[in-house]
Image (tube, rainbow, N blue to C red):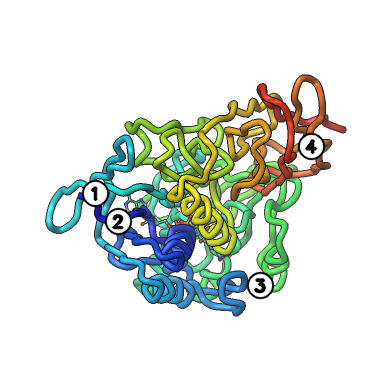
Amino acid sequence: MTEAEVIVIGSGPAGLGAATALARAGRRVLVLEREAQAGGIPRHCGHYPFGMREFHRLLRGPDYAARLRDTALSAGVTIRTCTTATALRPGGVVEITDDAGPATLTAKAVLLATGVREASRAARLIGGEKPGGVLSTGALQGMVYLNHQRPFRQPVILGTELVAFSALLTCRHAGIRPLAMIEPESRITTRSPVRWLAAALRVPILLHSEITAIHGRTRVDGVTLATPAGPRDLPADGVIVSGGFRPDVALLQGSHLQIDPGSGGPVIDRWGRLSDPAYFACGNLLRGVETAGWCWSEGQRTAQAILAALQGQLPKPDGSRLVLAHPALRLAVPQLIGAGASGGPYDSLQVRLDRPAKGQLRLMQDGRILAATRIDSLPERRLSLALPSTFGPGPLTLTIAETP
Ligand SMILES: Cc1cc2nc3c(=O)[nH]c(=O)nc-3n(C[C@H](O)[C@H](O)[C@H](O)COP(=O)(O)OP(=O)(O)OC[C@H]3O[C@@H](n4cnc5c(N)ncnc54)[C@H](O)[C@@H]3O)c2cc1C
């Protein structure tokens, strides 16, 4: 039975942004959300700043999520919460489970917007004992904003990307005073103005530093850092582990759809189409964390590609897989780029590094530079390279001409 013309899996900013645009264009849209409430990660981020791009005003995360929901519902979107998509089958067939048990839904197009997962402490290879009080930012926000708990008083924050600053704001809200933010690199990761927040809140950022051990039997009672001046102990009573986000591809694993080992997300073309053209993807699922506004905008643009697909106006899937030809390159999205096919919501490459690199990022074909931009970047920072509108058939290569 066809339940909707478009099924959207995931009700964060990307999914609801797309669903709203599709419904406003007159399409029947069904959003599936496994949580009891729609809105995605911002539901747990009880701080500013959300909503400037979407609603032209500054909102707290939960108010922003509510506004996304209300806007989608008034556009005519149907949202089914407490409903988990469990498997994807060829041609837009989605298996789900909810209170009523398992069921199968079909649609002409399915948009995947399932977001990211945070890396665990084990994945970050932090040694020492295994006491309570080691939390991801998401877990901290759930405790602080949803359960009104204060899990510690003076933790350290591992990481300096966007979400680490979200952790800082969450601490401030709960009256928690972090002892330090810990950054292994020589500068902080985020580029945005939030970097000044740490100074304003008088939280030192320790560069060139790493947590080598977490101490304590039942609770954290200290951490040891490796610093340029040698080992250093801090009397922290908790650790917030931020960063290391990976696309949530639980649904894609075991499906017929291709996953990109670099990004950890699905392989897409410049229309956001997956290897089965009934499926599209947008938001953090593609590559790891971006801001909510960025993901919402991707949702809006991917909706336009889905509308074109429903009207039979998208070019046939075609395009060779972009080759990453430099060891500092971790990912580039979209991965499939067709010759001569300009347009589409992903008309720029989104690139991220595995290690700091400086030089010229180059898109090459047959030894010719098709597009280039200067970079001086850290891992987890966004890099963009506009795709050329015309070029010939054949494989494309992305590389970096490094300068010392
Ligand atoms: C801890 C944290 C703090 C952040 N703080 C900020 C901030 O302060 N400001 C800012 O601009 N950005 C912030 N961000 C980034 C921003 O929140 C995200 O980029 C944005 O929410 C991503 O939107 P999304 O729609 O791609 O995914 P998400 O918001 O993650 O939504 C994905 C949704 O998919 C659902 N889902 C997953 N799998 C299934 C399934 N199988 N079936 C049904 N539903 C499923 C999930 O339950 C979730 O609701 C933060 C991110 C994190 C992780």
Residue at horizontal 25 percent and vertical 57 percent from the top: 83
Q: Which of the two labelled residues, at mark 4 and mark 1, occupies the earlier sequence position?
A: 1
Of the two numbered discs 4 and 3 in the rendering, the one whose residue sits closer to the viewer: 4
The disc labelled 2 sits on which kind of residue?
A: Ala
Where is residue 290? Give x, y as percent. Answer: 58, 55
Q: Which of the two labelled residues, at mark 2 and mark 4, occupies the earlier sequence position?
A: 2
- Judging depth in this view, the residue of 70 and 106 nearest the camera is 106
Q: Marks 4 and 3: CB-CB under 8 Å?
A: no
The disc labelled 3 sits on which kind of residue?
A: Leu
Tag 2 residue: 4
Q: Secondary structure at mark 3?
A: loop
Tag 3 residue: 201
Q: Is residue 133 visible in the rendered structure shown here?
A: yes
Q: How far apart are the alpha carbons under marks 1 and 3?
A: 49 Å
Q: Secondary structure at mark 2?
A: loop
Where is residue 112? Give x, y as percent. Answer: 41, 48
Residue farthest to the right? 404
Q: Which of the two labelled residues, at mark 1 and mark 2, occupies the earlier sequence position?
A: 2
- Whether the residue carrying mark 2 lies under 8 Å from ligand 1 is answered with no
Of the two numbered discs 1 and 3 in the rendering, the one whose residue sits closer to the viewer: 1
Q: How far apart are the alpha carbons under marks 4 and 3?
A: 41 Å
Q: Which of the two labelled residues, at mark 2 and mark 3, occupies the earlier sequence position?
A: 2
Disc assigned to residue 371: 4
Q: Marks 2 and 4: CB-CB under 8 Å?
A: no
Left or right placement of residue 36 versus residue 192 in this view: left
Q: Marks 4 and 1: CB-CB under 8 Å?
A: no
Q: How far apart are the alpha carbons under marks 2 and 4?
A: 40 Å
Residue farthest to the top? 366
Left or right placement of residue 290 versus residue 128 in this view: right
Of the two numbered discs 2 and 4 in the rendering, the one whose residue sits closer to the viewer: 2
